Every structure is written in C-alpha cells, then in structure tokens.
Image: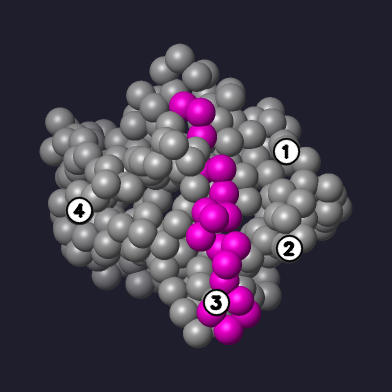
Amino acid sequence: MAGKNVITKILDNTNGNGSIVLATLNRPDSLNALNDELMDELFTVLDGYEKDDDLRCLILTGSDKAFAAGADIKQMQPKSYMDVYKEDFISRNWERVASCRKPTIAAVSGYALGGGCELAMMCDFILASETAKFGQPEINLGVMPGAGGSQRLTRFVGKSKAMEMCLTGRMMDADEAERVGLVSRVLKKEDFLAEVVKVAITVAKKSLIATMMTKECINRAYETTLSEGIRFERRLFHSMFSTADKTEGMAAFIEKRDPDFTDE
C-alpha cells in the first residue's frame, strides 16, 4: 500500500485484535494539497485496507501544520467544464473514502480547508488537535465546495453555520468545531497522534462484523426517514443474533471476562 503521496504504516495491536493502518498525506511543499495522484494512491490504500482481514481500523492524517489545505488549485485551474465532466473529477476517486466499509478516523492537526475539510468529513469521525482549523473557502476562488462540503457540512453543523462558512470562507477553530458537532473530540497537541491510536485500538478490539453493521446503520440515518431508519436498524440488530460474535460477547459479559471475537 506504499506510495509517495500517501505514506502507510501498519501499527500492530499487541492485544491480538488485528492491526491499524496509519495513512499519512505527504505533500509537505503544498500543505498536502489533494491532487489526482494523491487521491488515486489513497484509493489504492483503502482498497488494500478493506481486502485485508487483519486490518481493522484506518487513521487518516497529515502533518502538524496541515491535514490538507484543500484540492490542488494549480491542477484545477486549467480545467474546463468538459474536462472535469468527462474525467468524472472528484467522484472518480474521492468518494472511495466515504464508501469504505471498515472504520476510518480522520486525525486533524492544522489546516483542513476546502477539500481537506471535505475529506475529513468523509471519514467516520474526526479527532482534532488543538491546532486544527476547518473551513470551506472555495467562495474566494469564485466557486463552491465540490466534494460534499455544502451537503456534509450542513448535516454536521446545521444550515446557518454551514451557510456562513461557505459564503464568507472563514475558518473554524477546534473548540468551535467540537461545540457544533463537526469533530467528536479535541485532543492535546503534545500527544495527539498517540491518543488517536488509542482510540483506533479500542475500535479494533470490537467485533468487525458488528462494527461494520453499526457504521452502515448510522450512515443510513442521513439517507432515510426516522421510521425507515429504525426499521433498518432493527433488521440489522436481529441479524446479529445469528453471529458467533453475539454469542461470545454476551457470554463474556455474563462470565465477567473479555470477549474473544472471531468476526463470524
């Protein structure tokens, strides 16, 4: 899964519950601007992550200075409408993050602007350093968000806040991002990545089957009505009674021991 624009490292979980992928965006000269080459590499990383049964959680991060400061404007600037339409720009490779069936965590330090903010929102949840800054400043370029910013941000923080951010281009700091629900937690910058890894290990210890079903169910909440969402949840919940992990998890609880999940 190695590449020059996305550096991957496998972090072994010493508790025997599978491994964690640390995927680091690596274009430091451009504050990790997201170009086609980087997104193609990330696509490949996510494919490999999904196919490997030993890999149970992925952390997507950047540098201390920038998670990603946006899409690569130098690459976009010469493109015409026909260019982006024919190549299916953004849709072709960016949405692979949102469609990943296994858990993904965005670990954001520094700038997450434009496409960087949109990429973070495609992950299952965002953990932010105290230094994190989020924004959708595309309006300053004479365009609008194009990788889900107008849609996901609105669902995360509400219409008024999303409208203000997209129309003014202002940045939101980590404390505000946590307060309005864009990020799940803000962690101290000194040991930020180590704390994120602890969260990933916690996720990796769970039944992967249950984790994947839970992720699918929560994501369905954005796509359907309450009654249909509850029906979907109930059916998935019922289906879990056919799994060995349900039997093991409940037995371990009653016997006051740690469960030994087998993802079956």
216 is higher (above) or lower (below) than 182:
below
Q: Which residues are magenta?
A: 64-83
Q: Earlier in the sequence, mark 4 or mark 1?
A: 4
Q: Secondary structure at mark 4?
A: loop
Circle 4 residues within 10 Å: few <14, some 14–19, many ≥20: some
- Give the numbered dot on residue 143: 2
184 is higher (above) or lower (below) than 167:
above
Mark 4: which amino acid?
Met
**Pointer 4 residue:** 1
Q: Earlier in the sequence, mark 3 or mark 1?
A: 3
Q: Earlier in the sequence, mark 2 or mark 4?
A: 4
Q: Secondary structure at mark 2?
A: loop
Cβ–Cβ under 8 Å for marks 2 and 4: no
Question: Which of pointers 3 and 1 indicates the residue nearer the eye?
Answer: 3
Cβ–Cβ under 8 Å for marks 4 and 3: no
Q: Residue at x 57, y 55 (%)?
A: 73
Depth check: 185 or 77 in front?
Answer: 77
Cβ–Cβ under 8 Å for marks 2 and 1: no
Residue 66 belongs to the span the image colors magenta? yes
Residue 128 belongs to the span the image colors magenta? no
Depth check: 120 or 83 in front?
Answer: 83
225 is higher (above) or lower (below) than 39:
below
Q: Secondary structure at mark 1?
A: strand
